[in-house]
Amino acid sequence: MEKLTLHNTLTRKKELFVPIHKDHVGMYVCGPTVYGNAHLGHARPAITFDLLFRYLLHIGYKVRYVRNITDVGHLVNDADEGEDKVAKKAKVEELEPMEIVQIYTNSYRKNMAQLNVLPPSIEPTASGHIIEQIEAVKKMIEAGFAYETNGSVYFDVETYAKNHPYGILSGRKIEDLYTNTRDLDGQNEKRSGLDFALWKNALPEHIMRWPSPWGIGFPGWHTECTAMSTKYLGETFDIHGGGLDLLFPHHEAEIAQGVACFGHATVNYWIHNNMITINGQKMGKSLGNFIQLDEFFTGNHPLLEKAYNPMTIRFFMLQAHYRSPLDFSNEALQAAEKGFERLMNAMALLKNLKTADTSTLDVEKLKRNCYDALNDDLNSPILIAHLFDGAKMINSVNDGNMTITAADLVKLQQLYTDLVYDVLGLQPSGDSPENGNSELFGQMVELLLILRQEAKTKKDWTTSDQIRDRLTALGFEIKDTKEGADWKLKN
RNA sequence: GGUCGGUUGGCCGAGUGGCUAGGCAGCGGUCUGCAAAACCGUGUACGGCGGUUCGAAUCCGCCAUCGACCUCCA
């Protein structure tokens, strides 16, 4: 099996990945809070961990991939008066909270499918695991790491920090946290400003509420991930992923909760993807540069010059390393679009290349380079660079400047299918399954091109150019090759 | 203010103590009735100042600058 190294945020080093159980991997990734449409920011962790998921599967692991749906317990702010995001949205849109959850869960799944992100093995919801969360809170109280005040339960960071390194993941020192913690409203119930809520007492106007040993309430926002990850992956599991923005306090809190519940660390490898910026600025609702995935796909946003195919977005993200920040701009996306086309052209040529008795290209070396890149902390940009090197070779063989044996061609085809389709999860953007009439439609275009060819034979350039120009105006791209005219629909 | 991470050619974006990243754009060429597309070839680089070294864009120090987190955020 390939030797994969991954950057572990806990040690800030690349480490050889060794799963707890041979051949099996347990991976948990923080999913979306479903109170709004998925945006570009959601695509980054989804694609990052989809790549990891796909690569682990490709190199032979059985993977249980758990990605949660947060549908409760995420407060709009950390004050006691904070409203649940889902409940707030429900009030604004005059819908049941679970209607909100359903609408945006459906929308998220649709967008993920468009990006060719594989569904996880298990997609648990916070509201479906209230019992598990209550049990976890009970354990933490019993272990002496949590306390109840007025029907709410808080994690006692000070007590925890006496014997455990709170801040180990985010590199924070507890003393600094004290001096830098902001004064928020409603801190009076907590023993310390650092303490975070495990269970919140529900005020009468709260619509999402459940009974608990501490009265009617709802779970705090860090608890669900601890309860659900350990329920499905065990008390200790291999990989925990998420966005860098969740490092503190969310993942730090998860580590503390895990120790409080089980007496030991629950996660071996913490993996974090970096953030996306737009024209150098962080994406945020208040900055007005917040672009939803649907808006990318339709081009319907003031910052977008055109619509972008989901595969362009995917390819664009894979061209940067997951731990680097990635800046979005129309120019960068259009460059990615062109590059992606180039790669797909090579994929198409690969299907029927002419073979020869000898190869003037080294498939094994190319293959080694590609896997080395992936094994080095999922270096997808390097992988793609090697795939472009290969594309150049494929073009050269096609032009007759290089040769390939039949055996090497099979190997090369396998390599590209494995890496481009299976691991990178790219697919030709022309494959739009919603276009049911595409075959008939294609035949019509062919017919027009035959008429144009007849005109060309008669040197009737007026007619031939008219057909070509009108088709171009309709959005078709006509390519004249030695074998005749070829066409495709520009997106 | 604290912590962490960046600063690479026109743009995006890798990587490395000495050996071509790659893509896009540009330029030149092939193909074509003309185009378009495609393909081939090709230049420009490592924020500033010091230091270590035979050699640094790559290591160290200082400075400048940008960003992230510290509060919900993917």
Image: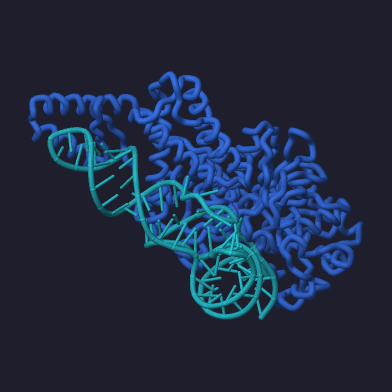
Q: In the rendering, what colour is chain B?
A: cyan
Say if residue A218 shows up in the picture.
no
Q: Does A188 appear above or below A356?
A: below
Q: How many marks?
A: 0
Q: Dividing the image into 4 quarters, which one contains the N terminus of chain A?
A: top right
Q: Horizontal placement of A116 versus A391: left or right?
A: right
Q: In which quarter of the image is residue A58?
A: top right
Say if residue A142 shows up in the picture.
yes
Q: Horizontal placement of A390 versus A88: left or right?
A: left
Residue visible at 13% across and 24% down in the picture: A454
Q: Dividing the image into 4 quarters, which one contains the C terminus of chain A?
A: top left
Q: Does A136 appear above or below A177?
A: above
Q: Quadrant of residue A398?
A: top left
- A438 or A401: which is nearer to us? A401
- A140 or A456: which is nearer to us? A456
Residue visible at 47% across and 24% down in the picture: A409
Q: Horizontal placement of A419 versus A157: left or right?
A: left
- A31 or A278: which is nearer to us? A278
The chain whose colour is blue is A
Q: Does A423 appear above or below A436?
A: below
Q: Please state the horizontal and vertical placement of residue A75, each as a whole percent of the image.
A: 67, 62
Q: Please state the horizontal and vertical placement of residue A283, each as a whole percent of the image.
A: 51, 62
User: Which of the colour schemes (rainbow, by chain, secondary structure, one colour) is used?
Assistant: by chain
Q: Quadrant of residue A340?
A: top left
Residue visible at 14% across and 36% down in the picture: A465
Q: Please state the horizontal and vertical placement of residue A354, each as a whole percent of the image.
A: 38, 22
Q: Please state the horizontal and vertical placement of residue B21, each as a whole percent of the image.
A: 47, 49
Residue visible at 35% across and 55% down in the picture: A305
- A35 or A287: which is nearer to us? A287
